[in-house]
Image (cartoon, grey):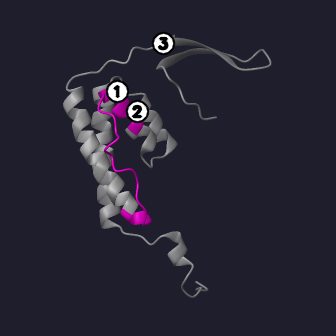
Amino acid sequence: MLATGTTRVRLLSVEESGPFLTAELETLPEEPGDEAAPLAEGVLRSFRQYQKRLAGARERSLTTGSDLPDEPGVVSYLVAAAMMLDTPTKQRLLQAPDTASRLRDELKLLRSETAIIRNLPSLPASDLTRGPTSLN
């Protein structure tokens, strides 16, 4: 199951005896952490580069980035949701202790993913079907 939350919570217990699963939760505050604002600026710059590279790889355009938010907490969740990452990596980002930590992790991931896209160009799947079929 994949859920989208609006508040950070910690799962304390799960009750399985009824017809539906229920849980006891603890609400967690969203702490900004040290240097969240400058980190958010760096993440936004890197995210725009990531989007450009990804759009080039897909031969289509993504958002221009001019409509992206500038509030660090919102940036951290938006980038985590928008990046092409596996579920465990996205979960790790959500579990960061504060916004600045999440932004630091995202910055590393963005740089890594952008380098991969830049250095390992690929053909769109539709181009792969235009050539002769190989028996290998």
Judging from the image, what secondary structure is the residue with disc 1 in? helix
In the image, the segment drawn in magenta is: 56-78
Q: In this view, does 94 lie to the left or right of 71?
A: right
Q: Distance between the residues labelled 3 and 1?
A: 16 Å
Instruction: Say how many tags the image has.
Output: 3
Spatial distance from mark 1 to mark 2, Cα to Cα? 6 Å
Q: x, y (%) of residue 4? A: 55, 30
Amino acid type, mark 3:
Thr
Q: Which of marks 2 and 3 is nearer the N terminus?
A: 3
Q: Residue 77 carries which label?
A: 2
Circles 1 and 2: CB atoms closer than 8 Å: yes
Say which of marks 3 and 1 sits in front: 1
Residue type at tag 2: Tyr
Q: Name the residue under label 3.
A: 27
| Residue drawn at 52 percent across, 77 percent down | 128
Which quadrant of the figure contains the C terminus?
bottom right
